[in-house]
Image (cartoon, grey):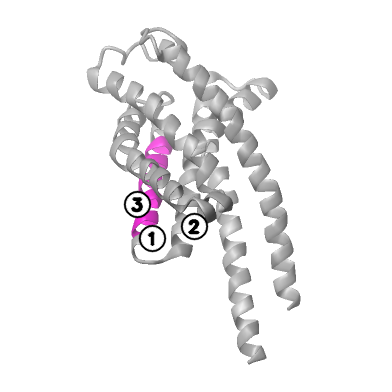
Amino acid sequence: MEATKKLGVRKKLLKLVWLPVAYLGLSIGLILIIQLILTYINLQPNVGFLSHKQNYINIPVWKTSFYVHVFSSSLCLLAGLTQFSSTILKYLPKTHKWIGRIYVYNILMINFPTGMILAFYANGLWPTKLAFVILDLLWFWFTLKSILDIKSGNIQGHKNNIMRSFALTFSAITLRIWNEVLSATTNIDPLSMYQINSWLGFLPNLIIVELYIRLSLASQRIKKQELKDDC
């Protein structure tokens, strides 16, 4: 019983920290995404991030992938406002289901292939390219696994994998936050900054989510064991 209480307290504390930070970050991210869309909506070739990609701007597959990725990935972030709400899941299950479908197929059919193309053309040499390739592969796998889990009736597995998937979706925001923090607090050269940032953008997100999942699973196992012992 004591072990269950300790795990429960840890889980609640993590949830109290993680959810407000996640929603605050998501709100900031949505503002950034709106600014991003406004920047690129006129399809000008030398604005924002594109000013650093002039060597690739005339490559049709890269240019198409960039714009598709920028405009469609915003829908994935928006899904975070609803898909982790227990209230919507309870009272508007169809809304949860349809937004979930948009999120999943957006990643699997649109953002995974375009993200992989952008990863191979990423600045920062092989460390950066490797980071974005791994990010994209994990993003695809956790999202796909969440579908397979819900179809097989594994609700817990679905929840765990969709959290992992969104942690990677959220990297679009944390990458920019880390960039601002490192730029303001260090004198790292731009190349090294981009290499470091490409990994910081998603690894801490996964670690936090994985910690939350592990605590939840451990708490469930202890509760089951205590019920057996009581019987």
Segment colored magenta: 130-149
Q: For mark 2, give the secondary structure.
A: helix
* Mark linked to residue 150: 1
The prevailing secondary structure element of the residues shown in magenta is helix
Q: What residue type is labelled 2?
A: Asn
Q: For mark 3, give the secondary structure.
A: helix
Q: How far apart are marks 1 and 3 (CA)?
A: 10 Å
Q: Do the residues labelled 3 and 2 touch (CB within 8 Å)?
A: no
The quadrant in which the C terminus is found is bottom right
The residue singled out by tag 3 in the image is 144
The residue singled out by tag 2 in the image is 160
Residue 137 forms part of the magenta stretch: yes
Q: For mark 1, give the secondary structure.
A: helix
Where residue 76 appears, as percent x and y from the top left, is 44, 37
Q: What residue type is labelled 3?
A: Leu
Residue displayed at 74% across by 62% down: 9
Relative height, residue 7 to residue 54 (above, below): below
Residue displayed at 34% across by 51% down: 144
Residue displayed at 44% across by 25% down: 124
Residue occupying the far front of the picture: 91
